Image: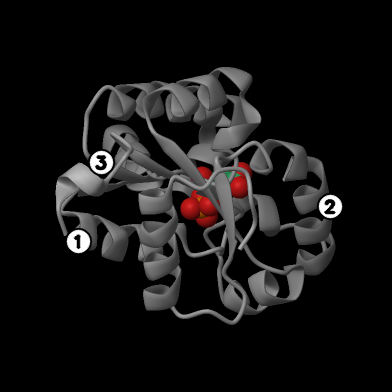
Amino acid sequence: MSKKRIMADNVILTGFMGTGKSTVGRLLAKKLSYQFVDLDELIVAREDLSIRDIFDSKGEPYFRNVESVVLRDVLQQHHMVIATGGGAVLSEENRKFMEQSGLVVNLLASPEEIAQRLVMDTERPLLLSGNKMDSIISLLQERECCYALADFRIDTTGKSVEEIVVLIIAHIEQGVKCETF
Ligand code: S3P
């Protein structure tokens, strides 16, 4: 693939937990010959603590602050595919930086599919207390307005990673914006 056909400096993947941002991002980066980064992995390395431990010992506001700092750093670079954490879109400032530095692609999945994908997960602090399905539904509702601001959206439900990557590349090349596929 010729890099000239890629319209975006960076490709920023947003979406709820379990929508496949990291898996899709890794393959997408390979196909585009871009570098892949997972924002949560950078945060864990920087803090030398797991995401769960950061939430437990320092609290969510501290995590959100580090998330914003790390995001801003990464967005200074070029030709990156960035998998953001599911809550990175909540900050208006984060969204502004994302919009300015690349193409924002939002990955969607149904609440049922998300619950299924995260059934064994014990590392997402926001889904550890109370009923997991209820938390997924209410967080999705709360965040929909932020996810919807992406340049384009892809419903990953029932699609393979390869299919999703092909769709993203096709839409990057066509420059299609503000639609759900
Ligand atoms: C979060 C999503 C997680 C992680 C943290 C908070 C969220 O990342 O950043 O647990 O608020 O949705 P993933 O979306 O990669 O699971």
* Crowding at mark 3 (Cα within 10 Å: few <14, some 14-19, many 20+): many
Q: Earlier in the sequence, mark 2 or mark 3?
A: 3
- Which quarter of the picture shows residue 129? bottom right
Q: Secondary structure at mark 2?
A: helix
Look at mark 2 in the image and give the residue it sits on.
Answer: 138
- Which quarter of the picture shows residue 8? top left
Look at mark 1 in the image and give the residue it sits on.
Answer: 30
**Residue located 28% across and 65% down the image:** 27
Q: Earlier in the sequence, mark 3 or mark 1?
A: 1
Residue 52 shows in this picture = no
Q: Earlier in the sequence, mark 1 or mark 2?
A: 1
Is 53 positioned to the left or the right of 3 in the image?
Answer: right
Vertical comparison of 66 with 154: above or below: above
Q: Position of residue 100 (x, y in %)?
A: 43, 22
Q: Position of residue 9 (x, y in %)?
A: 28, 34
Q: Secondary structure at mark 1?
A: helix
Q: Position of residue 6 (x, y in %)?
A: 27, 45
Nearer to the camera, 70 or 123: 70
CA separation in Å, label 2 and label 3:
31 Å
**Residue located 38% across and 69% down the image:** 166
- Mark 2 vs mark 3: in front: 3
**Residue located 18% across and 43% down the image:** 4
